[in-house]
Image: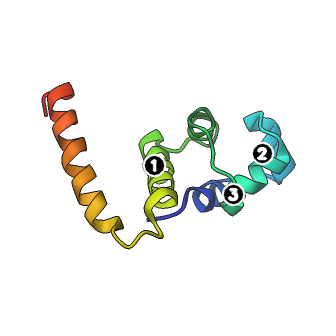
Amino acid sequence: MKKLGKIIRKEREKRKLLLRQASALLEIDQAILSKIERGERKATKEQILKFSDKYEIEEEELMIAWLADKVYQIVGDEKQALKALKVAEKEVKYKTTVKYGN
């Protein structure tokens, strides 16, 4: 799975936008955008929605990358990470089924 920052940078470069142009378009400080692209700062959910809208990227693709980065940040270095993720997956499946009837 691609890291969120790489996706954001690739889309900016695809549009031939300089960092300052993209930050103005997205209404995000240039330094913050640079850190997000380099993976040094996590984007907020609101920023993800802006990226999706302004760069015309599927919101779901960005949300998955954003959530994956968040999960990795929390459990990535833990020995029991995979086991914990399996337990969490069961919980998410149960709650989604109850909430959305899937």
Identity, as a three-letter code, of the amino acid under mark 3: Glu
The kind of secondary structure element at disc 1 is: helix
- The disc at residue 67 is 1
Seen in the image, is 84 located left or right of residue 102?
right
Circle 2 residues within 10 Å: few <14, some 14–19, many ≥20 = many
Q: Answer with the quarter of the image where residue 29 lies.
A: top right
Q: Secondary structure at mark 2?
A: helix
Q: Image quarter for residue 43?
A: top right
Residue for badge 2? 22
Image coordinates of residue 22 in percent, x first then y, are 77, 45
Estimate the spatial distance between the alpha carbons at disc 2 and disc 1, rounded to whole Å: 23 Å
Instruction: Give the side of residue 50 with respect to residue 84, left or right.
Output: right
Disc ID at residue 86: none
Q: Residues within 10 Å of mark 3 (few under 14, many from 20)?
A: many
Q: Residues within 10 Å of mark 1 (few under 14, many from 20)?
A: few
Which mark, residue 37?
3
Residue at figure coordinates x 60%, y 32% from the top left: 46
Reading the chain from its start, which is encountered first: label 2 or label 1? 2
Residue at left 84%, top 46%? 30
- Residue type beneath disc 2: Ala
| Circle 3: element type | helix
Q: Quadrant of the N terminus?
A: bottom left
